[in-house]
Image (cartoon, rainbow, N blue to C red):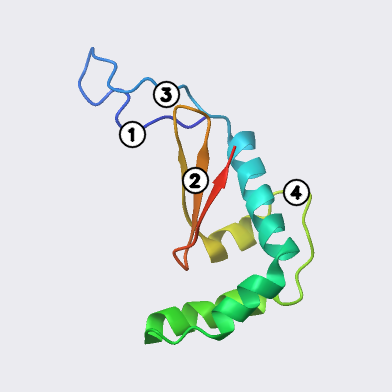
Amino acid sequence: MWRCNKKYEIKGENGCGNRHIDDKVLYHAFIITFNAIIENNEHFLEKWKSEDSDVLKKYKAKQFIKIIENAEMIEEFDIDIYYKIIEKITVHQDNKIIVVLLMGLRLSVK
């Protein structure tokens, strides 16, 4: 289970109204995100191959290309891929989940 960092920031006070989140919800959000990238890989590969804004972004783009180029859709959570592409996952009160990739791309999952 995961909870908001600010939920019990002050002892005795509920600082956040978000409910706890089960790992399975976050795993599912990752699977949806990864599969969306694979479904649209031509768009993402083209974008990453043309990346030339700075050295770090070019390096990350090359890493993403290697991961995505021949990848297939997944049905189960893959911790190795997760650590290679995900920066963070944020859950909002309206059950909207924002997945941020290490490339800075933000994807919304509901």
| Percent of width and height locating residue 46 | 62, 80
* For marks 1 and 2 on the same chain, the one whose residue lies earlier in the sequence: 1
| Percent of width and height locating residue 43 | 65, 72
10 Å neighbourhood of mark 1: few (<14), some, or many (≥20)? few
| Percent of width and height locating residue 80 | 62, 61
Residue 13 location, quadrant: top left
**Residue carrying label 4:** 76
Q: Secondary structure at mark 3?
A: loop
State the CA–CA distance, disc 1 to disc 2. Answer: 16 Å
Marker count (numbered): 4
State the CA–CA distance, disc 4 to disc 1. Answer: 27 Å
Q: Quadrant of the C terminus?
A: top right
State the CA–CA distance, disc 2 to disc 4. Answer: 19 Å
* For marks 4 and 3 on the same chain, the one whose residue lies earlier in the sequence: 3
Looking at the image, residue 99 sits to the left or right of residue 79; the answer is left
Disc 4 and disc 3 in contact, CB within 8 angstroms: no
- Would residue 68 be visible to someone looking at this image? no
**Residue carrying label 2:** 98
Disc 1 and disc 2 in contact, CB within 8 angstroms: no
**Residue carrying label 3:** 18
State the CA–CA distance, disc 1 to disc 3. Answer: 10 Å
Please tell me whether mark 1 or mark 3 is closer to you in this view.
3
Q: Secondary structure at mark 4?
A: loop
10 Å neighbourhood of mark 4: few (<14), some, or many (≥20)? few
Q: Secondary structure at mark 1?
A: loop
**Residue carrying label 1:** 5
